[in-house]
Amino acid sequence: MEAVLAKYENQFSELLEDLPDADEPVWILGECYNVKTKKSELLSDVRSRLWFTYRKKFSPIGGTGPSSDAGWGCMLRCGQMILAQALVCRHLGRDWRWDPEKHQPKEYHRILSCFLDKKDSCYSIHQMAQMGVGEGKSVGEWYGPNTVAQVLKKLALFDDWNTLAVYVSMDNTVVIEDIKKQCQQPGRESKPRAGPCVRGEVSVSGQSCSEAQERALHLQSQSLDWRPLLLVIPLRMGINSINPVYIQAFKECFKMPQSCGVLGGKPNLAYYFIGYIDDELIYLDPHTTQQAVDTESGSAVDDQSYHCQRTPHRMKITSLDPSVALGFFCKSEEDFDSWCDLVQQELLKKRNLRMFELVEKHPSHWPPFVPPTKPEVQTTGAEFIESPDKLFESEEEFEILNV
């Protein structure tokens, strides 16, 4: 049924292919574009996002399971896309653009290798489907936004290269204290403590003693390394359809520099939403079945099929299923603090009915928060790897990818 609906949806979207020549700005993951003057830049931005779709003829999941995810893996593919966007921002930056005519940095190929349809790729369809068993989902069963977020959170624990902290909020509440506990790690080098200060003294650097003390305290506070954060906020913005009272706040999320997109869609049809224009959402559609890419030879991956090189799909915001998951990426603690300020200003203070709550302290009636750690025993049957480094026999293979 999903395949039939997806085929109809794709045919219908053809009618909406061309972006409207309108004065309304287009927002794509925190970037603003004018269609009349910046259309090529807009399309380049969309084309640069990693696009994961259904694949066929990959090695059977679990050895005896399905060799294609067509008809059931769309939300898993959207989960891959939102995570890939976080990794691109982490290693390449939001301004990075993909150009098929140019060589890409090795970090790009390394990111892509994390998602290849192989059992030993850390975010492959194989790993995600088998990790989903621990979330009560059989291999081949359809996922919702919250379930795929939980799967990403668990898989990230086995990824030592990206060292990404995935925080999934619960009960529509984001707890600042818990996020900082999860993201802050002891630094490799201890910073100097601020010594006693006598009023009027001047330090060797020419600063007043109080200024030098303040700087030392600041350095001390920076002695905790911040793990880059993918913040996922599962929400239900209505009963059977999105409540119109949430629409403006929902659109504001795409304006934030930390925006990493939204998981959602329609019943049993998942899309990866990356922006909006006026009253239409812009999304990448995973409902295209492509041949699995053969990577056994060790040569560079043909990445053409991992970028959507067509005008992006659009749909009316009012057609959105109310069950979604917002995604945000914060590379540093300052980035996260800035996001908190934006949420307070743009989402909480201006709205009578809030999409979610942002609180400073862990609620006293909740169970204690324990940051997730990599389990000593692998419980789902998935063959995890400790690091994407192990996908390559040697560093020379990374260099091959850049030739």
Image (cartoon, helix red, strand yellow):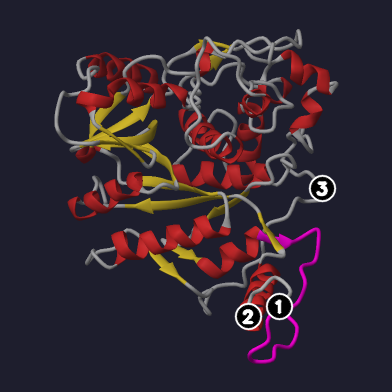
- Judged by its main secondary structure, the magenta piece is loop
Task: Look at the image and tell me whether residue 82 can be seen.
Answer: yes
- In the rendered structure, which disc, 1 or 2, sits on the residue that comes first in sequence? 1
- Image: 182 above or below 328: below
1 and 2 marks in contact (CB < 8 Å): yes
Nearest the viewer among 240 and 215 is 215
Residue 120's tag is none
Location of residue 241 by image quarter: top left
Region in magenta:
184-203
Task: Look at the image and tell me whether residue 266 can be seen.
Answer: no
Secondary structure under the numbered disc 1 in the rendered image:
loop
CA–CA distance in space, label 1 to label 3:
53 Å
Kind of residue at badge 2:
Ser
Q: Nearer the viewer, mark 1 or mark 3?
A: 1
**Which residue does the image show at 33% across and 46% down from the upper left?**
255
Secondary structure under the numbered disc 2 in the rendered image:
loop
**Which residue does the image show at 57% across and 14% down from the upper left?**
303
Which residue is farthest right? 394
Kind of residue at badge 1:
Ser
Residue 377's tag is 3
Within the magenta stretch, is there residue 251?
no
Q: Is residue 99 left or right of 341 when viewed as pictured?
A: right
Residue tagged by mark 1?
Answer: 203
Q: Is residue 225 left or right of 329 when viewed as pictured?
A: right
CA–CA distance in space, label 1 to label 2:
6 Å
Q: Within 10 angstroms of label 1, few (less than 14), some, or many (20 or more) residues? A: some
Kind of residue at badge 3:
Val
Q: Is residue 329 left or right of 352 when viewed as pictured?
A: right
CA–CA distance in space, label 2 to label 3:
54 Å
Residue tagged by mark 2?
Answer: 208
- In the rendered structure, which disc, 2 or 3, sits on the residue that comes first in sequence? 2
